[in-house]
Amino acid sequence: MTKAPLIRVADAGRPQLDPAPGATIGGMLSTGCSGTNAVRYGTAKGEWFLNATVVLPSGEVIKTRSRARKSSAGFDLTKLFIGAEGTLGIVTEVTIRLAPVLPTTVAVVHFPDVKKATEAVIEVLNQGVGIQCVELLDDLFMAATNKYGMSMRKWPEKDSLFFKFQGHSAKSLDETAAVVKSVVERHGGFGFTLAKDDQEATSLWADRKNALFSGLALLEGDNGKGWSTDVCVPPSNLPQLVYETKQDLSEIGLISTIVGHVGDGNFHALLLFKTDEELEIARHAVHRMVKRAIALDGTCTGEHGVGIGKKEYLYEELGHGTVELMKTIKRSIDPLGLFNPGKLYPDAPGAAKKADPRST
């Protein structure tokens, strides 16, 4: 039986990474995950994972570094295993840096279209106010939330932004809310709703956290599935990406919602399908979405990881030399291809597929 990695904590507070509820510490490190808090606290990188204990393919157990908050003692080997998706070693112990717990509140505002909403986000972030999270939920998602029936209110079925503000006092939260309200209204935002208390803030944010289940509520019957996508671009390119993706998805004949961590350029579309034919339509739409993101100087995956499904895009995104260096490191640490064979490392463009899936 595989056990979850042991967690050691450093400093006072709590972890500020906010992935999906089923996430594990080892998985968070191995995929370099993200979540709604990434606007304020960044992603699952070396700044949050201070060190890791790792079992190498040879059976040797190493510790990547000490518990010091910073170090210049050679390579930062912790980062070598972040995003390696379990292909270089098995993580058994992690030391996580914590952050202070500060007061927060939640606000929601609606827009005439996703382009105006994403443009508003860029200007809000440039104000330097206390934004912990900012999430885009499109009009179909808001309709899905109403249909799902778990919300405490009926929402206007419009493209919307959900903000979580963070500050040291109620006064600082109010100041942030005032700045954000002024900015979003300049971009056509309306119906600005600020939570009256912690209970209402929790209720509002729960509507965002129910994204998957709300989206699936749009399917009639019990045999449907959803394909959750994940692309990321520089925030300045996000309005174009979201707008073009929204246009594309509206033409393929499938129900799909958009929800994204738009404060750091990351967004997800949930494509709903029932048949094999619809699955193929979804597959091609996802391919176009990834190609569109890479063309905008983005990435095929902002937080979900590469695995098998997205390794075909790595040469285009990272370049031949970078991918070959990754494969050289893999061969050096795991020459027999024992750990997660077939994951992450793509065949070179034009190369014949190897008979042994463990080969890299």
Image: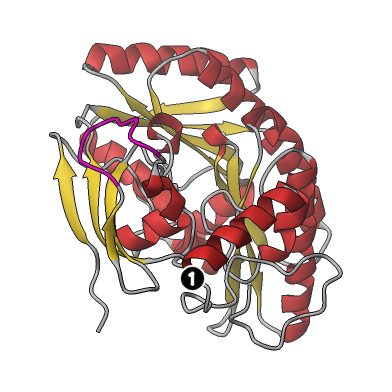
Q: Which residues are magenta?
A: 65-74
Quadrant housing the N terminus: bottom left
Looking at the image, residue 246 lies above or below residue 184: below
Q: In the depicted view, which residue is nearer to us: 166 or 100?
A: 100
From the image, tell me which residue sits under label 1: 334
Q: Is 72 contained in the magenta span? A: yes
Q: In this orientation, which residue lies closer to the viewer: 252 or 3?
A: 3
Q: Out of 59 and 124, give the one closest to the viewer.
A: 59
The count of marks equals 1
Q: Quadrant of residue 116?
A: top right
Q: Position of residue 243 (x, y in %)?
A: 75, 41
Q: Which residue appears at 60% of the width and 60% of the height?
A: 328
Tell me: 322 left or right of 101: right
What's the amino acid at mark 1?
Asp
Q: Position of residue 335 (x, y in %)?
A: 53, 73
Q: Residue at x 42, y 46 (%)?
A: 79
Residue at screen point 70% across, 56% down: 314
Q: Position of residue 30 (x, y in %)?
A: 42, 59
Q: Was residue 346 drawn as part of the magenta stretch in this picture?
A: no
Q: Is residue 170 visible?
A: yes
Q: Position of residue 251 (x, y in %)?
A: 84, 59
Q: Quadrant of residue 244?
A: top right
Q: Nearer the viewer, residue 186 or 119?
A: 119
**Residue at point 49%, 71% (across, down):** 334
Could one spot residue 300 in this view of the protein?
A: no
Q: Is residue 93 above or below residue 127?
A: below
Label 1 packing within 10 angstroms: few (<14), some (14-19), many (20+): some
SS category of the residue bearing label 1: loop
Question: Dividing the image into 4 quarters, which one contains the C terminus?
Answer: bottom right
Q: Can you name the residue that lies furthest to the right here?
A: 350
